[in-house]
Amino acid sequence: MELYDLKTEYKCDPLGMDAPHPRFSYKLRGSAAEQSARRIIVQQSDGTVMWDSGWQQSAESIQIVYSGKKLQPHTRYFWRAGVRMEDGCEFLQEKAEAFFETGFAGSAWQGAWIGAYAGEKNMRPVDHFRKKFTLKSDVIKARLFLSALGLYEAELNGVKVGNELFAPGWTDYYSRVQYQVYDAAELLHSGENTLQIQLADGWYSGTIAVLVNTEDHGYGPHPLLRAELHVELADGRKEIICSDTSWECSGSGAIRYSDIYMGEYYDARLEEISDWHNGVFTEEHPEIAMDWQEGAPVRVTEILPPQKITRSRNGCFIVDFGQNITGSELLKLPPLPEGTQIRIRHGEMLQADGSLYVENLRSAKAETIYISKREQPHTYAPRFTFYGFRYLEITGLTEITPDMVSARVIHSDLERTGYFESSDELLNRLYQNAFWGQRGNFLDIPTDCPQRDERQGWSADTQIFAPTASFNYFTPGFYTKWLRDLNACRYFGAFPEIAPYVCKLKDPAHWASGWSDAGLLVPWELFKKYGDTRLLEEYAANMAEYLDVQEKASNGTWLVKNARYGDWLGHDVPLDEEFLTTAYFAGMTRLFVRICRILGQEEEAMRREEMFGQIKAAFLRKFYSPSGELLIKTQSAALLALHFELLPENDNGQTLHILTEDIRKRDTHLSTGFLGTPLLLGTLSRCGKNDLALELLMQKTYPSWLYSVIQGATTFWERWDSWTAEKGFGDVTMNSFNHYAYGAVAEFFYRNICGIQLMEEQGLAGGKQITLSPVFTAKLQFAAGEYESMYGRIISRWEWKNSNELQWHIAIPCNSSARVELPAGWIAAEISENTILPSGEYHLIVTGKEHLK
Ligand code: BGC
């Protein structure tokens, strides 16, 4: 047996981990199916034991909560896991070791918030800070702690510290900011050292904040920096170098501005700074908590070469990377005459005449200006801005060869956990588009889109895509960080529709159904996928308050109306606002009942259950006829009623019939928007309509998922008609080509086509027990899904062998088990009704009685 992938708070060997009671997890592989007991020991480097769990009879290997002595700041702790396996009558024991290191853990910072430019203007030169210091002997250990209200990048003795971009990330800067920790020992030496840091406006005081919050100039008028360098020297001394007014500054470096919406202006002639001066000022911001980084760092994860370079009529070059991405260009320039100006614009699409389509960027200029220095080769990439693009339009060069330009793919660098492939190339591309959609919209926060003057953490987009996102990638840290901000931006008790929210809301009714509900749905997703109950616990009171806001708004009627965005961008007649809000209100109340039960709050569960009954009754009175017929006959209305289980007893399939009839009436097309679409295929499948679900999925004509794929889309579009053959580009006021909301369909590939379903019950969530319930369809020759769960790799791959026989390959990780549900009419020798398979690999032959290929 082997113990592997030991994680503390979802991270391998984290630095700067400040959770007072961190949670541990590990995975097991080998011949045995389940552990019978486990033991965790946490020690300091001198051997002092902080916690010894003792041998616990338990088959649990995730979410093991530290409950030892109080953890100290700036300390490394090692932990070991021991397991006993019950393998026949033999006991095995395996061990593995990991560590975590605390950061400030709530202790005070000595470094001050420092700034260099106090004017109130964004689109200004990036601030440079410099601190020279002497170390009297060799460095044994060094940790550099950095944070900013703005964005920073640091260099120690001319070498970039870490490979993170867009640090410290976007949080609710009114109340909290993250700091990062870097191991800096290798970059320091005995003698004189220089720490140099660039500071840009970023989300804090750049146009992204100013546009949204014109009154108050974003979060603050200018960016600020905070730093501490802790060094342990060979002579036994410890030194701390802190940001303060002794630091030098300059505003005359090469980056004349760098702005998330507008782009970057870089004058390479100014790379050598000659006017370092004093002038650093300090500010006090005790109201802003210094939080550790729970999410993942943003990094360059891939570099794409150009697929095609063409020259357009007006003399500029169009570079096509063949894939719509988020990131920026990387230029490798040959020597150019000094002062040559290169202008680069970014676009997701081309116009019919081959020129760049940039109308959809709205006020975002999204362009790079680069001025060359003396005749020297030069490598350059923008630093504090990102673009959503597939094409570059480059002006100012007389020649471009493929080695001169490439595209840097930039996003939160999460571990990939999901894979899907089938015999259908169009479906595979659709899946890839969802995957790229996530890469394009996971840039420290979950965004709606990466290109226009928006790029905000819209909460509907987030909740809609979270189930797919958490199949594709390991998301718990990423979403936990975002949920902190969603919860920090609650004004008047409701969750906001965007997080982080730049403006402090003044309107109590400023929440929206389907959007604000992310406050319950995203923690629930993390419970389901990762068995995380801590977030449910931490935010249960806020969830309750959100439900209370709705109850109050209903004025005793239990009917609520607050769905500003309706079934956003759907094709139906607008969905009745009261219907939508009340359906969500009911759905969330019921979900909250489950959450209360998980938390052992039975009294509250019963109270909320009773509320659910009232809401459902009011909903039925208003939206169903006495004979049990849904009065609003649209696809999304039927879907919400079915999904939130709001049907009356005498429904008798009528609501499902409304849904299927409407789809058929439209010649097997959907008409749903942001809220209805993610429910569509899963609900049809749950109601036994797999064939219809697959027909819809594989529909090629407009409106459908594959329509965009056939048009050559490499990411999901915001609208079903973002571009159509008949009308060309859709409504330019809002026309993103990298909007992942409709990409939520990819959940169906994992969950239904391959049948990998995670249980939602306490003790079974997080992959402890899974259900394998695939859809075998003659529309595909094979389908293969893999998901790296908290326990290890789950595989479900089926393939037709002959006209009524399939081979189904299953893998279930150690410490987990699977309930196997064959579709009706199928049999396998090993499987009877409700078979629970223990961990292991299985190659089943499955025979269809009636379902012949
Ligand atoms: C965003 C959406 C968002 C919506 C709210 C748009 O501008 O791009 O994805 O959910 O606003 O209606």
Image (cartoon, grey):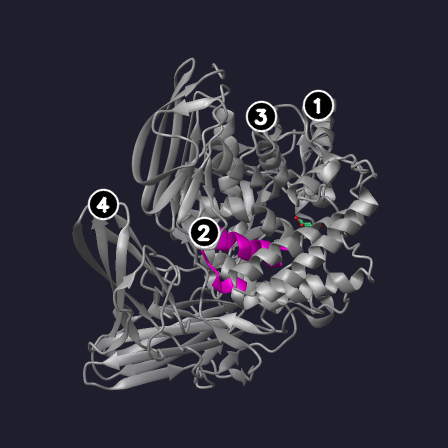
Q: Magenta stretch: residue 525 in it?
A: yes
Provide the secondary structure element on which disc 4 rests: loop
* Mark positioned earlier in the residue sequence (3 or 2): 3
Judged by depth in the image, the label closer to the viewer, 1 or 4, is 4
Judged by depth in the image, the label closer to the viewer, 4 or 3, is 4
Residue 794, given in percent of the width and then of the height, sits at 37, 41
Q: Is ligand 1 closer than 8 angstroms to the Cβ of mark 4?
A: no
Provide the secondary structure element on which disc 1 rests: helix
The residue that mark 4 highlights is 30
Mark 4–mark 3 distance (CA, rounded to whole Å) = 44 Å
Judged by depth in the image, the label closer to the viewer, 3 or 2, is 2
383 is higher (above) or lower (below) than 782: below
527 is higher (above) or lower (below) than 307: below
Task: Please state the extent of the stretch shown in magenta in the rendering.
Answer: 516-536
Three-letter amino acid code at the position of disc 3: Ile
Residue 690, given in percent of the width and then of the height, sits at 57, 27
Q: Is residue 130 left or right of residue 521?
A: left
Judged by depth in the image, the label closer to the viewer, 2 or 1, is 2
Mark 1–mark 4 distance (CA, rounded to whole Å) = 50 Å
The residue that mark 1 highlights is 664
Residue 242, given in percent of the width and then of the height, sits at 41, 82
Mark 2–mark 1 distance (CA, rounded to whole Å) = 37 Å
671 is higher (above) or lower (below) than 182: above
726 is higher (above) or lower (below) than 677: above
Three-letter amino acid code at the position of disc 4: Gly
* Mark positioned earlier in the residue sequence (2 or 4): 4
The residue that mark 2 highlights is 765
